[in-house]
Image (tube, helix red, strand yellow):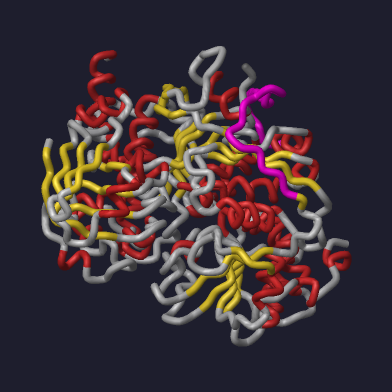
Amino acid sequence: MGMTLVEKILAAHCDREQVKAGELINVKLDGTLANDITAPVAIREFNKLGVETVFDKNKVFLVPDHFAPNKDIMSAEQAKIMREFAYKHEIVNYFEIGEMGVEHCLLPEKGLVLPGDVIIGADSHTCTYGALGAFATGVGSTDLACGMATGEAWLKVPETIKFVFKGELQPYVTGKDLILHAIGDIGVDGARYCSMEFTGPVIDKLTMDQRFTMANMAIEAGAKCGLFEADDTTLAYVKERAKRDFTVYKADADAEYCHVIEYDVTNLEPVVAYPHLPENTHPVSDGKDIVIDQVVIGSCTNGRLEDLRVAARLLEGNKVNRKVRTIVIPGTQQIYLDAMNEGLVEIFIKAGAIVSTPTCGPCLGGHMGILAKGERAVATTNRNFVGRMGHPESEVYLASPAVAAATAIKGTITDPKEIKPFEEVMK
Amino acid sequence: MKLTGKTWKFGHDIDTDLIIPARYLNTSDPKELAKHCMEDADPTFAGKVSPGEIMIGGKNFGCGSSREHAPIAIKEAGITVVIAESFARIFYRNAINIGLPILESPEAAKEIQERDEVEVDLDKGIIYNKTQDKTYEVPPFPPFIQEIINAGGLVNYVKKKVNANG
């Protein structure tokens, strides 16, 4: 019997010829990740284990990104716990704020995750690395503590839902719209405990940045991971970054899937997820009467260079609506630098947006852009739960960077083609 | 082990932001987290919940973030067991790893009402609703997960393994 992509990767990490969906296995880890919120809890548990140090000081990744630069005394104390642990155990991949970024933008950029890897991270969006053809999944702090100590984790081999995307993408329809469409179709628990495998001619043509966006949101359908087979696009991305060997795995032709779902995306408009669940999706044209107070362009979902580029080109020569507070957050220091060198930062500032140092802050209502009671935001982030960006009676609408930028200009949810033709923006 | 208590009932897709909003995650002190448990779903919950009570959820309970602060807040608030129609994957792992018993039973979770008196026999996998005089059976955990529970959570389980190998 053939194996799916996830079965292939997991079998190789428990030294087995074959594993099957449903089996409980113990895998060897290529990396373990925690941030300034989840690391302190993990360190508390790690210290109970009675081990001298971490399993491999090169394979523990620690990124202070959620409340950093620290927003208050309490978050500073949390970051300090993490920093002291990193120095004590000589963690190579601890990234202080000057070299950091939003963790799921940073790790692929630094070449710390490569095709075929198995990674666990104490952050649910660790599934982002599935874009590289790696098995990566979010876990809690206790799992992470045990992973840091032993270099192993127990996992149930997930069943796989195969998604086949066919047809022609319309202008301004991106990876973000594809994943929102899929979540809208199957629901926020539609892939619970499963691997989502993204395939088809549309996927083959997607850039890495768009694949990261899609894999990132697999958790919003309840999935364990969201995987893409590594192809030439992937290899071109990792070639510059990889400092060690890696293996590309492919699904077998006779692999067994629990479902195969096909979408013809030819008639798909840009998609917006309304409050308060990512499954509550609507075509962008439905939102033209919804007045917006804030736009956030950034996060581990859509804070990459391509995201900033499309937003900037829409904003170029325009001003953000004076009633829309517009916040742009490059995903990493490198993305920030690239955006400066390309002139994107200047465009944002001239348009009346602010540009922040990399942080997860507003995405989870932490800092930098908290909403007041009754306010509405369009965000390129991944969650629109109750209270996600601030007051429990505020609202978050999820959309692509193009829709977010167009909305910032108009003040209501706007199809970017109303601002500029796609061809002009992509030239 | 038998647990008995009155219930608190919540709906579908109770996410980790409802269980413990991120604005309180600048601490990892369980007592501080418990003060804000379920705040955005029911602001009165943390002030009213009594030790030994039971939480009921709908489908996909605990979806969203990996924050272990969520099951920690529930456990520290005094809840002894969570019964739901279904659990999100990371929450399920986290609850087992920290020793918060959770049971998946669509029928029980649907039929139990708020403030019913419920008895749970964890070893036998039986939920008994005293108020309605109804019994539900829950499939047992796989042996491997049972081992983690019996060890008192993942840290104790791994500690034993590490020491045995060391």
Residue at (76, 54) in percent of width and height: A265
Which of these two is toward me, A112 or A192?
A192
Residue A251 falls within the magenta-colored stretch: yes
Horizontal side of B71 relative to A263 (left or right) equals: left
The reply to whether residue A391 is visible in this rendering is yes
Above or below, A400 relative to A257: below
Above or below, A374 relative to B43: below
Residue at (78, 46) in percent of width and height: A166
At which x and y percent is residue A388?
A: 44, 65
Horizontal side of A309 relative to A145 (left or right) equals: right
At which x and y percent is residue B38?
A: 29, 62
Which of these two is toward me, A87 or A211?
A211
Q: Which residues are magenta?
A: A239-263
Residue at (50, 64) in percent of width and height: A384
Above or below, A48 relative to B16: above
In the picture, which quadrant includes the N terminus of chain A? top right
